Image (cartoon, rainbow, N blue to C red):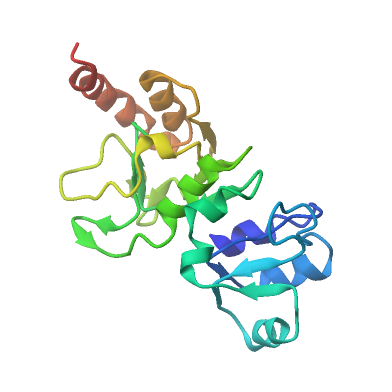
Amino acid sequence: MPTAVLQALGGKRDLGIHSGMISDPVIELMESGVVTGARKSIDQGKVVTGIALGTDRLFNFVRHHPDILFRPVDYTHSVAVLAQIDNFVAINSAIEVDLFGQVNGETLNGRQVSGVGGLVDFMRGARESSGGRSIIALTATGKGGEISRIVPALKPGQTTTTLRVDVDFVVTEHGTADLRYKSVDERAAALMGVAAPRFRQMLEEAWGPLRRAHLGH
């Protein structure tokens, strides 16, 4: 997901990066002027990261580039630091999102398959940033299209990694669900709209009982 996001930024200019990890596409973005950090409100002109993960080309680039700053996790993931970056956009992925907007980023069929990582830190930092936004990006289906990753509700045994109030946007290949300032029903409708078409009827049918249980009528 990080690589796909970076590769889609080729037409932008003067972006800034503050991340837990950078990879090879950062090289082209920096060399072409897409990423300059010129407009960052802190660490201006610098790419801030905790880890570089990629090829020898990336490691050589990082070694000789003074504008790439490595910082410890208590800086890269600090909500207080992230909140100081104006217009900070946090883009994370997840295993599934339910119709309330709750995010599971850790468990699959009740089994732990991932850690929390920076998911919560970066989303909450973005919410505290002036003009910031938090985005969950994921494919609409899993297992080769057999299951929907937009689900009616997180099942017992699945973790709620981030609360529904932490999510601004959910993005799949079918569009963008803007969850900001929406009612419970409006949020559910927006999320159904970015689910795979073959699963939308199932989600609509499941929403009625869920809504009644949640709202008490």
Q: Whole-percent x and y of residue 123?
A: 47, 47
Q: Looking at this rendering, what residue extends furthest in the top direction?
A: 217
Closer to us: 191 or 27: 27
Nearest the eye: 70 or 53: 70
Residue 64 visible in the displayed image = yes
Give the image quarter of residue 162.
Answer: top left
Residue 185: quadrant of the picture? top left
Q: Residue at x 67, y 81 (%)?
A: 58
**Which residue of the protein is positioned furthest toward the right in this rendering?**
32
Residue 53, image x, y percentages: 55, 78
Does residue 211 sit above or below 96 in this rendering? Answer: above
Please name the residue shown 69% across and 74% down the image: 68
Count of marks, rendered view: 0
How far from the left and from the top, in percent, is residue 15?
A: 74, 55
* 40, above or below 54, in the image: above
Instruction: Tell me, yes or no, if residue 93 can be seen here.
Output: no
Instruction: In this rendered view, identify the residue nearer to me: 217 or 131.
Output: 131
x and y percent of residue 174 in the render?
Answer: 53, 39
Q: Residue furthest left?
A: 156
For image coordinates 65% across by 43% down, the residue present is 87
162 with respect to 159 (left or right): right
Q: On the rendered image, what quadrant is the C terminus found in?
A: top left
